[in-house]
Image (cartoon, rainbow, N blue to C red):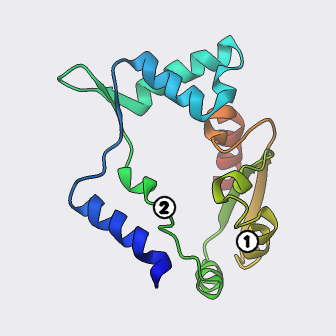
Amino acid sequence: PKRYAYWMDELKALNRGEMKLKAYDSVEAVAQRLIKTNPRLGRDQAARDRAQWLAHHWASRTAAGQWEIQGDVAHKIRGATVSNLDEVLALYEAITAPTLFVDAAEDSLAGWYDGKFTLAEFEERLKSVANLKRGRIQDAGHMLHHDQPEQLARMIEDFLA
């Protein structure tokens, strides 16, 4: 269908090596990029220090002296997910392993999906996962692992214990 045409174009560009993550001139510029994406990392000195620490682990220095993000450019492909509700529910119902789902108290879903997919719809889909344990992290947004890493680590440790 036409709605998948852009996705196929992006997949082809990825496979041709045409998609790249931006390189930065300094690790400080990487930290500023993190703060731009997640303003919580700029709200006080402790958060800014965390942004600096993250920048050193999220990027590495190239031989040319630039800092490259150590991520997979494929995550930038729009819509690279199953969007047919019946298929999504079938996939969720097929999950048999104990599953931990942790979300942030601040709902950012609407911003990512421009109102086309709501938190209520997502919650309804999660009901299809049979062995699901839920966790919620307060004072956190989309990058909850940046906002509250200790709280997230405790939840994961408790789940695995």
Q: Separation of disc 1 and disc 2 at Cα?
A: 22 Å
Give the residue pinned by disc 2: 78
Which of pointers 1 and 2 lies earlier in the amino acid sequence?
2
Kindly check if marks 1 and 2 are in contact, taking CB atoms under 8 A apart as contact: no
10 up-or-down from 21: above or below: below
Residue found farthest to the left: 63
Viewer-nearest residue: 147 or 1: 1
- The furthest residue to the front: 2
Whole-percent x, y for residue 126 in the image: 73, 71
Q: Position of residue 25 (x, y in %)?
A: 33, 20
Q: Is residue 9 above or below residue 134?
A: below
The residue type indicated by label 1 comes to Leu
Q: Position of residue 85 (x, y in %)?
A: 65, 83
**Secondary structure beneath disc 1?**
helix
Residue at image mark 1: 126
State the residue at coordinates (73%, 61%). Answer: 115
Q: Is the residue 94 above or below the residue 156 in the image?
A: below
Please identify, in this view, whether the residue under mark 1 or under mark 2 is nearer the observer.
Answer: 2
